[in-house]
Image (cartoon, rainbow, N blue to C red):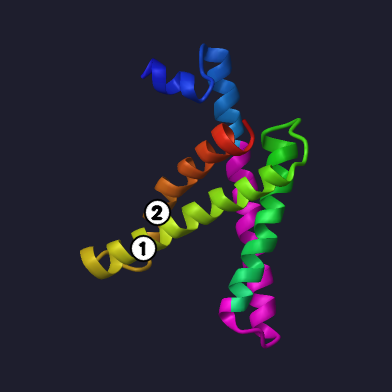
């Protein structure tokens, strides 16, 4: 367990609380990101944009929001780089694909309710996305 904690930068109780605080801030950014995604998506659909295009535009813009706040609020002091932006889109894209795959598996194969499955997925994708951002994007 110590090795696992050391990977995320936990070496003592003080650093443990730093990581917990980062995770909470990451969750706050995630909630705002989700709200921004939904507002953009529903506005675009309302004004006649095809739902798949609306989804793509909302995803692109919400990840810009996530990058901005994660670099300034969660993982402070990280300068803008094109590579970091690419990595943010890769991390969010990977977890979006994983969530979609899990959703299909849970609903169509296992038979879990399509109302419950996305909530279950959050317990997998949020920590994974946090780790990808902490250890890869904003290392």
- Rendered view: 114 above or below 98: below
Outermost left residue: 110
- The quarter of the picture where residue 27 lies is top right
Q: x%, y% of residue 22?
A: 61, 32
Outermost top residue: 12
- The quarter of the picture where residue 115 lies is bottom left
Who's the residue at 61% across and 77% down the image?
Answer: 53
Residue 40 among magenta residues: yes
Q: x%, y% of residue 97?
A: 45, 59
Judged left or right of residue 35, residue 130 is: left
Q: Quadrant of the N terminus?
A: top left
Answer yes or no: do the residues labelled 1 and 2 have beta carbons within 8 Å? yes
Q: Secondary structure at mark 2?
A: helix
Who's the residue at 65% across and 47% down the image?
Answer: 29
Question: Is residue 23 in view?
Answer: no
Structural crowding at the residue carrying mark 1, measured as other residues with C-alpha within 10 Å and reported as few (<14), some (14–19) or many (≥20): many
Judged left or right of residue 86, residue 96 is: left
Q: Main secondary structure of the magenta part?
A: helix
Q: x%, y% of residue 133?
A: 58, 39
- Rendered view: 34 above or below 17: below
Q: Secondary structure at mark 1?
A: helix
Per the rendering, the mark at residue 103 is 1
Who's the residue at 54% across and 48% down the image?
Answer: 91
Magenta region, residue range: 25-52
Q: Quadrant of the C terminus?
A: top right
Judged left or right of residue 58, residue 114 is: left
The disc, 1 or 2, on the residue closer to the chain's N-terminal end is 1
Q: Which residue is mark 2?
A: 121
Label 1 vs label 2: CA separation?
Answer: 7 Å
């Amino acid at each position: 367990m110590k090795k696992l904690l050391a990977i995320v930068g936990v070496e003592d109780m003080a650093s443990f609380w730093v990581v917990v605080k980062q995770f909470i801030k990451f969750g706050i950014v995630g909630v705002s990101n989700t709200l921004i995604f939904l507002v953009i998506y529903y506005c675009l659909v309302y004004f006649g944009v095809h739902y798949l295009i609306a989804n793509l535009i909302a995803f692109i813009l919400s990840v810009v929001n996530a990058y901005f706040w994660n670099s300034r609020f969660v993982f402070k002091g990280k300068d803008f780089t094109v590579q970091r932006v690419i990595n943010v889109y890769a991390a969010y894209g990977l977890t979006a694909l994983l969530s979609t795959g899990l959703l299909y598996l849970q609903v169509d194969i296992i038979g879990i309710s399509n109302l419950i499955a996305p909530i279950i997925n959050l317990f997998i994708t949020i920590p994974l996305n946090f780790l990808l951002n902490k250890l890869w994007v904003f290392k």
